[in-house]
Structure formats: structure tokens, C-alpha cells
Image (spheres, coloured by chain):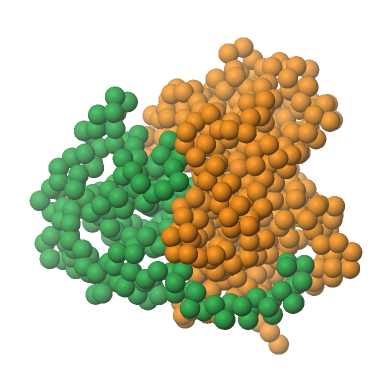
Amino acid sequence: MHRPRTLYDKHLDAHTVCTLDDQGHVLLYIDRQVANEYTSPQAFSGLREAGRQVWRPACTLAVVDHVNPTAPVRIATMPDAGGALQVSYFEQNCRDFGIELFDVLDKRQGIEHVVAPEQGFILPGMVVAAGDSHTTTYGALGALGFGIGTSEIEHLLATQTLVYKRLKTLRVTVTGELGAGLVSKDIIMQLIRRIGASGATGYAIEFTGPTISALTVEARMTICNMAVEAGARGAFMAPDQKVYDYLADKPRVPKGELWEQAVQTWRDTLFSDPGAQFDLEVSLDVGELAPMVTWGTSPDQAAPIDQQIPDPLQEPDLIRRQDLQRALRYMDLTPGMQLDQIPISHAFIGSCTNARIEDLRDAARVVRGRQVAAGVRAMIVPGSTQVREQAEREGLAQLFLDAGFEWRQSGCSMCLAMNDDVLSPGDRCASSTNRNFEGRQGAGARTHLMSPAMVAAAAVSGHLVDVRTFSLEA
Amino acid sequence: MQPFLTETGIAAPFLAANVDTDVIMPKQFLKGIDRNGLDRGVFFDLRFAASGAPNPEFVLNQAPWQQARFLVVGPNFGCGSSREHAVWGLKQLGIRALIGSSFAGIFFDNCQRNGVLLIQLAEAEVKDIGQWVSTPDSAELSIDLEQQQIVLHDGRCIAFEIDQLRKQALLLGLDAIGSTLQRTEQIRAFEARYLQAHPWVA
């Protein structure tokens, strides 16, 4: 009789080449990697300097996403010297090492974590590592995904493995039916608020419960994506029929008998055994949840939209109090202020967290029949070129344009502002992204995180607002 | 990789919580294809005023901490983006070790791969060391990795834990890829078995 194992245990056991010590270090085999132009160059240079080859080039998919402009008309060359150099070196590396590349003009280009699932590049049961922290997204497909630095990219390219230390496990059980106007973004923001920005540091999270089962696969991706903002180095959900249906028609998934064989194996194995022990358990009832927004400079500095900015003087710990005061100073907000009265200058719908087609449909329901408020610059940057085209086919693009939104090309864009989509000091942005760090969207700029529908509601109102006060057509 | 044996130098206190890698290395320094010139970017918005002049309020611009070789940091240091540029920059600035109560996972691995020692202690101990090195006269300390101890200016010794695997790699300055490639045959054998059992991965 085997000891009951968690889904995380099963992923690790299936991918362990060998154990390296008795402290949890293993040599872990990695199935897939997604590479981008900004965290990979030094890894390829390292291979070149050492005269090393890429172990399995077909395991890596390269996508230009971080530095490219998102202006409506696409051009192959980057407007700035740094971005141009990164993109041309990326192309050279992919060519020389035999790695498939989606360049900026490719119809399949987009944000790596949107592109990989829509291509069917990631399958349940896989272990995926990539040079981007939001690689946790793939947990929604029943894969273990985690971010790595450039040295680890080089190690992975050269050996198809990583020296990996086993994490502790945290099970988050989500119950309760989400109210109208609420989405999975609100669930993950509430979790981060509750356990803190390092509440899951050192852990892999497994999300479970009826609320998770009821979500679409895309909505689940938002949760796994942002789990890293609680420190999780891996966040996943046992795959179900929705996942298999989502993947079935994707271009790169196995076909025919091989697909049937794969699905059967996943059904038989990819779940935590009854009785499996987790190191930590958290229960989250979201039945009474209100739409969440951040007010500070860390993703855990969040509150329901119907509440007020908290008072740092209520915090007994001196260092924590200073952190709160610093955050409010940076955000130019005062304790006691109503969250739904904070005016905005910008609205941004984009990023690997919330720019898939369902996110754009959510935003469109709010925007229909309304106009972007005077003095607000509102932008929509679809998660991928395919999402953009689908939204155009569905009439969403025209709806956004008619309402006064900019309808842009795909990329990471103003989520981290590595390209030319940068806010100015003092700008205040309602954003469907994942990080409200100081300077994240531009030096001195202020970010409020929220769901795409909440961003759309703020864009047409000119201030943060409770989307539940809007009458929406179904 | 430069081995880490015993290091002595100034420790700078920077105890804010959740210092993210965007703050450690802002976006405008991420546009290179090499590792050069990143020392200038470290804590850029904190270290420099809009004019480009050093901000005298920031600890790394003050004597004696402008020569810091160690940082004493708040919880969850290095959270957020995976950008290894943050660690390359710290290293170029001369930082050899960080003392804190918790570090974000990717940042932790990035430091290890670059020979930057991360020492994890209880939050109260970190605060205590942070306070101690906040006085110029007691800002200097030594870190002995072999003995796994920090020696403060008054001779107090503070022991720390570290996985032996990490410790050996740091002491010897090991090349991680070279070490793993010694297991090439083992990886190949595993891969053949694994792909046979999971043919849809191939």
C-alpha cells in the first residue's frame, strides 16, 4: 500500500532524475520551456561561451512579447536600440540553436503565457519552467509551472533539468458562489490579501473546491498566474473534463489514439490521493466577496471596493506601519478615503493575468453603451494576436473603439512597461495586471489592480467604482 | 563563480518588507543582452534623485554604508519578477551576502547561482542585526560560511543554517551546469524511460 500522494508529489516523482541529498534537492526533468527576448540573451551567450548545445530544442517555444510596441500598426523592427538588439539576438539564438520562434509579425505572437496554452504546447502532468515569474499560469492545465532566472534558463537549455528543492504544499479550498460582477481575479486577490505577499513563499499551492470546479479554464489561469504574488513557486489544479475539452482542438496537442491514451493517464493519475497530507490548509469562502482593488504598492494591500483606505496607525508593528505609510505616500492616498472615489487618469486591460478572450468579453459587457470618461486614457492590449483577431470577429474591438478605448496589438505592454507603453509620474491607472509595485508601470506612476470588468467600469466612470452598480446586458 | 569563504565588510540596513525586483532593478536597465553596467541600476529610484544626483537620504549613499558588502533586509526580499538582472546588479555593486528572514523563491535561486550568499534568520534576529549595523561604528561584520556564522563588530557570533548542497557550491564556486552534465548518462536514461511512458510529451 502506497502512501497517499499530493498532485505535487506525483509531478515531482514522475520527473525526478535522481535525488541529490536528504534535504529535498532533486535533479528535476523539465518537459517544456517558453522563452522571451529579455530574460534569455545571457543564457544563450553562456551556452556559446562554453560551447554547449541545447539538449532538446523542441521543448522550448520562443515568443517576442516583453519589449515590442503595441501600436495598432505592427512593424518588425523595435523602435529603441535596446529592444532592437534583444529581438535580433533572440532571432539569431533561435536560428543557431534550432528553437521555434514566434516573432512580432507572427499571427501566433502574444504574451508567452497566453500563447503557450492556446497553442496546446502545455499539457496536464508536465513540468514547465520559464524565465518569467508568471509561469505558474500553467497550473490551470494540471501542469506544474514555475519561474526561473537566466542562469537556470541556461542550465535548462543545456541539460533539460534543474537542480530543484522540493517545496512544502498548501491546499487552498475555495467554496461559495461568486456574486454577479465577481470573477476569479477577485478570488486570488482576496487570497493574497488574506495570506500576504509572502504567505505562500516556499510552497506549491493546490487550489480545489466547488468554486474552482465551476470556473472556466481561462478563469483558473488567472488564479494560478497570480499565485506567485503570494510567493508560490507553483500553483495548480487537478485537471478535469473542462481542461481536456479546452485542449482538445489546440494545434499542438497529440491527436487520435495518443490523445485518448494521454487523457486516460491524466484521469487515472492527476489528482491528490484521498488522505494525502498538505503542510498547510487554507479555506476561502467567496460567497460574500465584493470586487477587490489594491490601494497600496504590494498586491496584498487590497480591499473590497466598498471599503476605505486603512489607517497605518492601527498597525502595532513599527516596520509594518512604516511600510503602510510609505505605500500611502507613494500612492498619494489618505487613510479613511473611500476606495470608490479615487479618480484615475488611465485604464489598462492587458497582461498574462487578464487579457484572454473571456476577459475582453467581461470588459465589453460593461463598456457597451457607455463612453470612456473625459480625461482618461483607456487601452486594451489583447493577450495574443489570436485573441485580438477573435475579439475583432466578435465585434468587441469595434465596441471598444467606439467607446473611446485604444485597441492595440499584443504584448506585455504596460503590465511592466518595458516597451513604450509607460505611465508618467503621478499618473493613476486602473489595471487588470498583477503587480502594483512602485514604478512598475512607470517611475512615479500609481497602479490599482482589479478585474477587467472593474477596469472597464473605472474607465467609463473616471474613478474606481463598484461594477455591481452597473446594469449589464447578459 | 567566485567562491564564498569568509567575507568582512560593512552591512547596510534596508528593512522594508516586500522589496521587489522592480525596485531593485527598474525596467530601463533590462534592455541589454549582457550583464554589464547593472550596478548603476540597483535601487535606482531610491538611490538617485530625478536630477540624477545621489539621494542623500538613502542608506547606500551614506558613509560608511556606501561601501556595503552586505545588506540586512526585510521579509520577502526580492519578490516579483524573475529578472536576474537584480542579482547581477547587486553583485556588481559589491554585495556578497544578504541577511533576511525570508526571500522570494526565484530571487533565492538567482543569488545562489551567482555566488551571493543568502542567510535566513528569525525576523527578530534580523531586526536586531539591522539595528546594530545602523550605527556607523558597529556597521562592520564578518561572515564565515564554513563555520556558518556571522560575527558582529562586538564579537557576538550568530549561527545560521544552510543546506550542505548550497554551502558546498558556494564554498567551491561550482559551475552548476558542469556539475549536472557529469550526470549526462543518467539524464539520458531517465529521459528514454520517461518518454516511453509518456509518449505524448515527446
Residue A80, can we see it?
yes
Which residue is pictured at 54% across the width and 65% down the height?
Answer: A53
B107 lies left or right of A366? left
* A133 up-or-down from B26: above or below: below
Q: Residue lying farthest top?
A: A374
A197 or A352, which lies in front?
Answer: A352
Asked which quadrant contains residue A383, the reply is top right
Please, which residue is most extreme toward the bottom here? Answer: A1
The quadrant of the picture occupied by the C terminus of chain A is top right
Q: Residue A232, image x and y in percent?
A: 54, 56
| Residue found 48% across the figure and 74% down from its top | B180
Q: Is residue A279 visible?
A: no
For the colour orange, the matching chain is A
Q: Residue at x 39, y 49 (%)?
A: B35
Q: How many marks?
A: 0
Q: Position of residue B108 (x, y in %)?
A: 42, 59
Toward the right, the furthest residue is A256
Q: Quadrant of the N terminus of chain A?
A: bottom right
Instruction: Please name whichever residue, A119 or B157, is drawn nearer the observer in this view of the structure.
Output: A119
Indicate the quadrant where residue A105 lies: top right
Q: Is residue A134 above or below residue A404?
A: below
**Image location (x, y in percent) of residue A267:** 81, 68
The picture places residue B163, in percent across and down from the top left corner, at: 39, 73
Q: Is residue A34 left or right of residue B149?
A: right
Q: Output the letter for the chain in green.
A: B
- Residue sitting nearer the eye, A293 or A380: A380
Say left or right for A321 vs A75.
left
- Residue at figure coordinates x 85%, y 52% from the top left: A249
